[in-house]
Image (cartoon, rainbow, N blue to C red):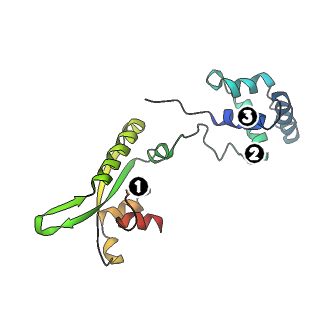
Amino acid sequence: MFTKPPLRVSTLVKQATAQAMSIYRLAQLINEENANAGTKCKVTPKMLKKIRDNPQKVGLTWEILVALSTYFKKQGASLQQLPILETRGVLEVLVDARRLVFMLGAKPRPEERRTDISRWDTRSHAELLTQASLLAGQRKFDIEDVLWRSPVNVDEIGATSWYRAIEDDHASVISIGSPTATLSSEVLLA
């Protein structure tokens, strides 16, 4: 089920007023900061209360955003650096990429022409894939087997498809398994 992400400025106003500051004082400080900066942008206490308590009913104008940005930049929370909508978890960030690659540690059994993957890793993959597909819509999902090797030859792993996926700037990578069991987890941690 999709839930609407929180509005970042609503959270910032809540945080500012939670520190024993009234909504009226916050409006006064925002307006003073904007007057000092020469933006000619202002906010009202009523607007700030609406942003804080009912952000879904707020009509944000350019002037209001400039006023908030000017004030919160001085407080160390630049709206230019932060997304306007807050993310609720790591999966939302991962599914922003065009391609999501899951890497699972695998143990080769060449004499039986098989590759084994842990049941728990597979179950974790299934759960993450389900959640990611609910958030992502039209994304490409891939799975890469990361074959266990001992000893590891650095030149050989550079030619593997899973290692190339790590270097792909348009992919988000999830390596499932501990660094001792999955080489991709160790590479990502390094």
Q: Can you tell which quarter of the image residue 29 is in?
A: top right
- Residue under circle 2? 73
Residue at which label 1 appears: 173
Q: CA distance from mark 3 to mark 1?
A: 34 Å
- Answer with left or right where residue 103 lies relative to residue 60: left
If the image is split into quadrants, where does the N terminus sit?
top left
Choose the circle earlier in sequence order: 1 or 2. Answer: 2
Q: Residue furthest front?
A: 120
| 126 w.r.t. 9: above or below | below
Residue 155: image location, x then y, percent: 34, 77
Q: Nearer the viewer, residue 15 or 156?
A: 15
Give the percent coordinates (x, y) of residue 106. Answer: 27, 62
- Mark 3 Cα-neighbour bin, 10 Å: few <14, some 14–19, many ≥20: many
In the image, what residue type sits under mark 2?
A: Lys
Question: To which residue does mark 3 refer?
Answer: 13
Helix, strand or loop at mark 2: helix
Q: CA distance from mark 1 to mark 2?
A: 33 Å
The mark lying in front, picked from 3 and 2, is 3
- Quarter of the image where one finds residue 15: top right
Discs 3, 1 touching: Cβ within 8 Å: no
> Between disc 3 and disc 1, whose residue precedes?
3
Q: Given the image, on which type of amino acid does mark 3 rest?
A: Val
Above-or-below relation of 74 to 162: above
Separation of residues labelled 3 and 2 (CA atoms): 13 Å
Q: How far across and down, in percent of the image, does residue 57 sit? A: 64, 20
Q: Position of residue 56 (x, y in %)?
A: 61, 24
Q: Amino acid at mark 1?
A: Val
Label 3, secondary structure: give it.
Answer: helix
| Residue neighbourhood size for the residue with mark 1, other residues' Cα within 10 Å, grouped as few (<14), some (14–19), many (≥20) | many
Left or right, 71 with reference to 149 = right
